[in-house]
Amino acid sequence: MPYIPKSDRKKFAAVLWAAELAMKEHGISNGELNFLMTSLGLLYLRRHGNSYNTITDVKKTLREAADEFSRRLLAPYEDTKIIQNGDVY
């Protein structure tokens, strides 16, 4: 889950700001977003070692992030579309 204490988020502020700046200046494609997410996972592996546990840590983190993203953003969007266009079920 992405819900870490606000005080712990500060250490990543500069990196996120630089990424935001690069996206504003150059745009970003879905492939480039995938590249960034994969690169973060690989940085984690380099930091913690390449083992079954660390590889699955990255895999689980990416999967859980995707699930939470869907729960918080995609599901409400789909609910709005159901209201606008009618339910299929």
Image (cartoon, rainbow, N blue to C red):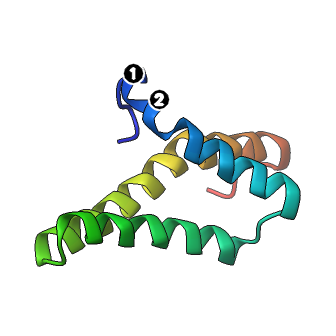
Q: Secondary structure at mark 2?
A: helix
Residue 17 image point, x, y percent: 66, 42
Count all numbered tags in the image, as a single digit. 2
For this rendering, which residue is in front, 89 or 60?
60
Name which residue lies at 18% across and 78% down. Answer: 50
Residue 81 image point, x, y percent: 77, 47
Residue type for callout 2: Lys
Q: Is residue 16 left or right of residue 43?
A: right
Name which residue lies at 87% across and 57% down. Answer: 25
For this rendering, which residue is in front, 34 or 11?
11
Query: Compared with residue 58, is residue 89 higher up or lower down, i.e. above or below?
Result: above
Determine whether label 1 and label 2 are within 8 Å by CB.
yes
Name which residue lies at 44% across and 31% down. Answer: 9
Q: Which residue is mark 2?
A: 10
Question: Which quarter of the figure has residue 83?
Answer: top right
For this rendering, which residue is in front, 72 or 40?
40
Query: Compared with residue 53, is residue 61 higher up or lower down, i.e. above or below?
Result: above
Question: Which quarter of the figure has residue 72?
Answer: top right
How far apart are the alpha carbons under marks 1 and 2?
6 Å
Residue 23 image point, x, y percent: 78, 57
Near mark 1 (Cα within 10 A), the count class, few <14, some 14-19 or many ≥20, is few
Q: Which residue is mark 1?
A: 7
